[in-house]
Image (tube, rainbow, N blue to C red):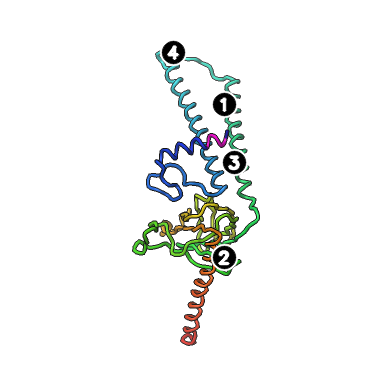
Amino acid sequence: MYRKISAAVASAIAVATSGSALATPRPWQLGMQEPVTSIAQGIYDLHNVLLVVCVLIASFVLGLLLYIMVRFKASANPVPSKTTHNTFLEIVWTAVPILILVLIAIPSFKLLAYQAHAPKIDLTIKATGYQWYWGYEYPDDGISFDATMVQAEDLKDKSLRLMDTENRLVIPAGKNIRLITTAADVIHAWAVFPFGVNINATPGRINEVWFRVDKTGTYYGHCNKICGGNHAFMPIAVDVLSEKDYAAWLVDAKKKFAKVEETQAVKLAALAPAAR
């Protein structure tokens, strides 16, 4: 029943959007972005079911209000009732909301437990928030780089304004990813909604979350905390590659970012005699 309601709502949204792709945000988009992880799918299904519950409750309350306005208006009741209590009704309107909340809590707690208990991890990535960009580190591979927003004048044909980064985070499809977050200055939040991920990055603390993306492609997110003047210019771009393509990227990335570190070391060494 839970899945059927969610599927019906999702189908209605798909029709309303006239077949537009939901993998990236679109102007006038209706509904959430397409979920590409099991966690995001669970959030999406729960959202769709709760939307139906909210509409039914709101419709029921509106119906009661309209009935009361017509049935008990002054012209129809010149002598108003002096009833103050009804034990049965008071029990019903207390017990029914409690029952609804309990029924909502069951799938909610199951989803929270699923998010909290990570399976066997294949890749660990550390994301550090700075004002106003992200730094990524692959501890097992010795790779680290920064991901700053692509400026308007540097946009390429397939780049999205205010959403693309100079260096994208790259992960393999079909692998369990552990993302560790922290921050160097103020509180940030790493949020990529197609992954169902929205996790704080707090100075002096480590948070972690896991996800698994089975669909290759490019996905976008942003810092979801108001972290200062350039908060709006702190995007997240993630490339999800096949295992073969990821292995090829990893080889190139080790060379590319090692070369950057070497260049910085050479510059520091050149400045050292002048400092003395």
Circle 4 packing at 10 Å, graded few (<14), some (14-19), many (20+), is few
Label 4 – label 1 distance at C-alpha:
25 Å
Q: Residues within 10 Å of mark 1 (few under 14, many from 20)?
A: few
Residue under circle 4? 77
Query: Is the Cβ of the residue at disc 4 closer than 8 Å to that at disc 1?
Result: no
**Circle 4 — which element?**
loop
Judged by depth in the image, the label closer to the viewer, 2 or 3, is 2
- Per the model, the C-alpha gap separating discs 2 and 3 is 32 Å
The tag on residue 93 is 1
**Range of residues picked out in magenta:** 2-6
Q: Which mark is residue 138?
A: 2
Query: Residue visible at 55% across and 52% down?
Result: 214
Q: What element carries label 1?
A: helix
Instruction: For marks 3 and 1, give the one nearer the viewer.
Output: 3
- The quarter of the picture where residue 208 lies is bottom right
Question: Going from the N terminus, do you reach mark 1 or mark 2 first?
Answer: 1
SS type, badge 2? strand
Residue 178 is tagged as none
In the shown orientation, is residue 147 left or right of residue 154? right
Q: Which amino acid does label 3 sit on?
A: Ser
Nearest to N terminus: mark 4 or mark 1: 4
Kind of residue at badge 1: Trp
